[in-house]
Image (spheres, helix red, strand yellow):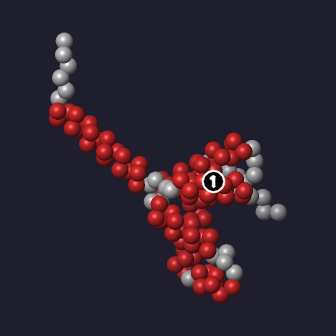
Amino acid sequence: MTHRRNPSLVGLVAAMLLLAAGPLMAHDYATVDRVLFVQSCLRENPGPQFEMIHKCSCVLDRLAEQLNYEDFVELSTDTNATSIGGERGAVLRDNEGVQKNVRRFRQMQADAKKACMIRPADPR
């Protein structure tokens, strides 16, 4: 008994796979940025290494669900750049658009950390 493939069914399955791959690839981040994010998260949230690697990766995955790569780069750059001292940093700290991005990104990070069971830092 020979099985024949229905060409229209094969085409439909191929089209569905391509459509499904689009959203997955749309929020794919560069590997180096993923590594740097997780390393930074590990420094900020000490704990058992294996557990924290998974939790920090979870945070980035949550952010990637909400932000495409370009938006992630913009928001994280704005957030990191506000720590620049002096006049150069003041330009960013005094810019309401940048501050809005910083508040948005920090809230997204806090929500992701909570969802991934990373406790807020002790304010001591």
Observer able to see residue 16: yes
Location of the C terminus by quadrant is bottom right
Residue 19 horizontal side relative to residue 103, left or right:
left
Image spot of residue 75 (x, y percent) = 53, 68
On screen, 63 above or below 87? above
Residue 82 horizontal side relative to residue 8, left or right:
right
Looking at the image, which residue is at 55% across and 77% down? 98
Q: Amino acid at mark 1?
A: Val
- 107 vs 52, nearest the viewer: 52
Report the residue that reaches farthest toward the right.
124
Image spot of residue 111 (x, y percent) = 59, 56
Report the residue that reaches farthest toward the top.
1
Residue bearing mark 1 = 38
Looking at the image, which residue is at 34% across and 45% down? 20
Image spot of residue 81 (x, y percent) = 61, 74
Image spot of residue 119 (x, y percent) = 70, 52
Looking at the image, which residue is at 69% across and 81% down? 85
- 119 vs 92, nearest the viewer: 92
Q: Quadrant of residue 1?
A: top left
On screen, 78 above or below 63? below
Q: Quadrant of residue 34?
A: bottom right
Looking at the image, which residue is at 31% across and 46% down? 19
Disc 1 is placed on an element classified as: helix
Observer able to see residue 111: no
Q: Label 1 crowding class (10 Å Cα cut-off): few <14, some 14-19, many 20+?
A: many
Q: How many marks can you see?
A: 1
Residue 50 horizontal side relative to residue 62, left or right:
right
On screen, 22 above or below 10? below
